[in-house]
Image (tube, rainbow, N blue to C red):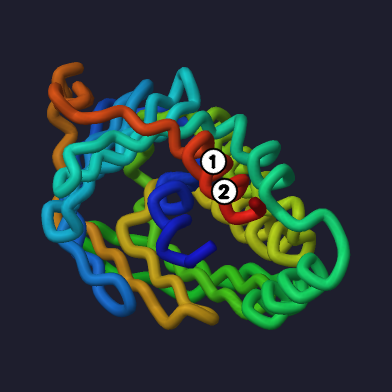
Amino acid sequence: MKLTSTFAVIALSCSSSLLAGDLTLTTKTSGTLKDQSTSYLTANWTRTNSPGLGIDVIHDIQKGIRYTVVHKTKSIRFVKIADLAAAANAMAPASGKGADQMNSAMNDMYGDSAIFKVENAGTEIVAGRSCKKTRITSGKLVWEYSTDPTLHSPVDPAVNLKMANATYAALAVYPNMAKVMSNLTNAAAKLSGFPLKTRMSGYNGEIVSEITSVSQTPIPASAFTLPAGYTMVDELAERAKALAHRRH
């Protein structure tokens, strides 16, 4: 799994003792991944539109479904987060040389899961807001969060953490990698406030995502409507079919 593929979930995983109203955020991402995006957050839905990448990612929080809208192919790839772990177990080599080589490769990329620490890294101003910086190290990965303690996500933090952990449960076939990611997820969930800047570094270079504007205007339900005329694709079923074809 690439570092970039986990960013959207983790960036929204900070804990908050208070729930807030809707949030609309514009974000600039630089480094290994370059992007300009707009995110919409409500208690039941999140959506991130990335015109430069040609995709929108929508999460139905209550049903635990992630939709990836791919405009180039006019398709909507969907996956039930709760099904990821079972699908990963079914697709991974159970034992033997292939499994050993994959686990070894993952260990080299992600590092020793016993290396874990959370540090205060000072303060900084992001989008005109005073933020507390926290550095989380797990294995070879280092994630820095700049969180605004006065701003809170409308998404229930317990639900968000459950969704994030379900996503990483898919890594259970790679125990060391799973532990490295679990350490990061759970540490991020304990942070107070909302992350306005995130710096992720490790085996896959560095990604810096910085929110440039924040709006707390109510978001209409229509913002999360899936586009009409697009083909629905069951992502896990497609993967299983491709794997079965390769095995034969």
Q: Which residue is mark 1?
A: 241
Q: Is residue 135 left or right of residue 174?
A: left
The amino acid marked with disc number 1 is Lys
Residue 9 position, x and y percent, is 45, 47
Up-down relation of residue 234 to residue 173 (above or below): above
Could you tell me how far apart the alpha carbons at marks 1 and 2 are, in whole angstroms? 6 Å
Q: Are marks 1 and 2 in contact (CB under 8 Å)?
A: yes
Query: Is label 2 in a helix, a strand or a loop?
Result: helix
Up-down relation of residue 193 to residue 1 (above or below): above
Q: Residue at x 70, y 58 (%)?
A: 178
Closer-to-camera residue (214/243) = 243
Residue 164 position, x and y percent, is 56, 42
Q: Residue at x 47, y 56 (%)?
A: 6
Closer-to-camera residue (60/185) = 60
Q: Is residue 76 left or right of residue 243?
A: left
Query: Is label 1 in a helix, a strand or a loop?
Result: helix
Up-down relation of residue 143 to residue 221 (above or below): below
Residue 190 visible? The answer is no
Q: Which mark is residue 120?
A: none
Q: Which mark is residue 245?
A: 2
Q: Residues within 10 Å of mark 2 (few under 14, many from 20)?
A: few
Up-down relation of residue 226 to residue 195 (above or below): above
The single residue placed furthest to the right in the displayed view is: 96
- Quarter of the view holding residue 140: bottom right
Residue 9 visible? The answer is yes
Residue 35 position, x and y percent, is 20, 64
